[in-house]
Image (cartoon, helix red, strand yellow):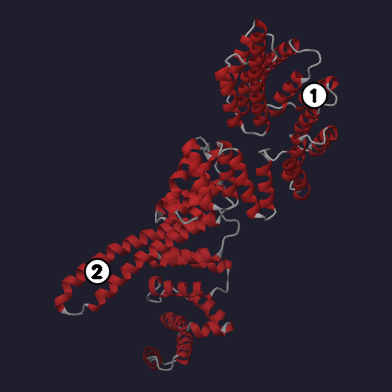
Amino acid sequence: MNFKNIIRVGIFILLTISAATGQTLQEGQKKIEMKQLEGAKRTFKSILAKDPNNIESMFYLGKVYWLQQKNDSALTLFQKAAVMNPESPLGYIGQGWIALNSKDEKNVLSMFKKALNYTKSKDPSTYMNIAEGYIYGTNPNLDKAIENLDLAKEISKNNPKIFVLKGDANATKFDGNGAAMTNYELATDLDKNFVQAWFKIGELDAHSKNYKEAEPALKKVKELDSLYVPVYPELAELFYYSNRLSQAKEMYRIYLSLCDYDLDAMVRYASFLYLSKDYENSIKEILKVQTKDTSYLVFNRFLGYSYFETGKYAEAIPPLRKYISQTPKEKIEFKDYEYYYKMFLKTGQDSIGRIWMRTAYNKDTTKIEILGQIAEMLNKDADKIYKSYDSLNRIADTLTKKADTALKGRILKDAAVVFKQAADKYHEAVDAYNYKLAHSVHPQAADYFVIGRDLYKATDYDNADSAFKRVNEIAPSYIASYVFRVNINVYYKDTLATTGGAEAVCDTLIEHLKIDTVAASKNKQVLMTCYKYLGTYYLKKKDCKKGKEYYLKAKELDPGDKQVLDILKGLNC
């Protein structure tokens, strides 16, 4: 082979390597455009493994890290690029991006100035890259972005990419969707087959819930480039919100296969499954993601919720616990605490559940019903204990033989212990109801009634009477609370009928029962109690006529009551 042929072969090999590298570089750039950041990262690392001095790959790898907000890794690459080729604008652009994220305005201006100094006069890319820093960085400055894009447009007025970037800049504004759409459409006017612009049009419409307008644009993308990866999750979500679930899942299936089950794609798919309430498959996909990367803390929330929704309550606790323990309190939502306490309740851990119920209420004090649920739970616990006490008493009552005296004594002693436990639990429930009432705008009579009933069972009669009195202040015709008050005042407070403590409540109850004949027929016993009490009270006050009047009413109610008949027989008035 002569020297000329050797030279030709050498040039061919170099051109082949250069073309292959250039093509791979374009693939990496396309992956960035398509938001396949992990795939892009692998591409640029592969290039750099073969060609460590490839400045463009170094810059774009840094860009990927910057987009992932891994600023330290990005800065290292940008600085290295600037050292290796100080006359390339790329290293300075990247360092300017990092300075923007740090709000280091002085360094921003310095780096961008250097980048422009090393830019060829007819190259718009530096202005476009600077604009990207102002659009996609953590501290956007949209006016600066537009300013640089206008300068880029002066150099390359028919570049559709510039209009896409202008659209992105406007899309981040609160009211910029109209201007964004105009720029995307201008890009398609310049190039009818510019895939990225069509995708942006569809994406903007979809995110604005204009699904009818979004669908043709996204399908156009698919026609122009069936391998344009981000169109598939957008179509999937469009189909999902249009109630076409099977089509949505098919789009995600294609998306995952095109991404070669890239982590970013798996994350998005798992999130979609959770949001579409496909909890069984959501669990499977989240677990797959977590085998690759455990840094997605929010997936612990999704996993906990999904386990709960599929009835796996014990499995739900650890992931949600991890999410709550590692998330700043201000970012934890009421829903997180709500799911968490329900998990404990479902697994029989009521005492822990109640603690988290209070935490949930403190997060959202409009959820007053939670306080009621806490009180109801305590009340049920107390009722269970009281039922045991009642059972022991019933057993003791059956032991009537002399030989059973010792056993009966032991049972009654046990019953006393159980009663104390029940009384304590009732007081705990009352405290919970009072806490609820203290935080209620409109206290409910029903809550006061339960308080009164609980205190009655706990033999705290004075406080029970006060609670029932409060019931009738709110609901004057609520008969049941009068019944309790009569029993308390007659049988536990004024047992000898000497103070007249039950007179007022008896008079009130009698008046109500005159009006409500149905209630009167159901409450003959308490009505009899009132007539007897009032009759005895007035007789002891030496008012025989009035005392007799009440006993005659008692006789009318129950003509065969021996006590009433005997008292009437002995009266001489």
Give coordinates of residue 97: x percent, y percent: 67, 21
Residue 412's label in the rendered image is 2
| Residue 85 shows up from this direction | no
Q: Amino acid at mark 2?
A: Leu
Q: Secondary structure at mark 2?
A: helix
Q: What residue did someone put label 1 on? A: 149
Q: Nearer the viewer, residue 567 or 296?
A: 296
Residue 520 showing in the rendered view:
yes
Looking at the picture, does residue 164 appear above or below residue 55? Answer: below
Name the residue located 72 percent from the left edge and 42 percent from the top edge: 222
- Is disc 1 placed on a helix, strand or loop? helix
In the rendered image, residue 141, in percent from the top left (x then y), is placed at 74, 26
Q: Is residue 352 left or right of residue 366?
A: left
In which quadrant of the rendered view does residue 128 lie?
top right
- Residue 520 drawn above or below residue 93: below
Neighbour tally class for label 1: few under 14, some 14-19, many 20 plus, Cα within 10 Å: many
Q: Residues within 10 Å of mark 2 (few under 14, many from 20)?
A: some
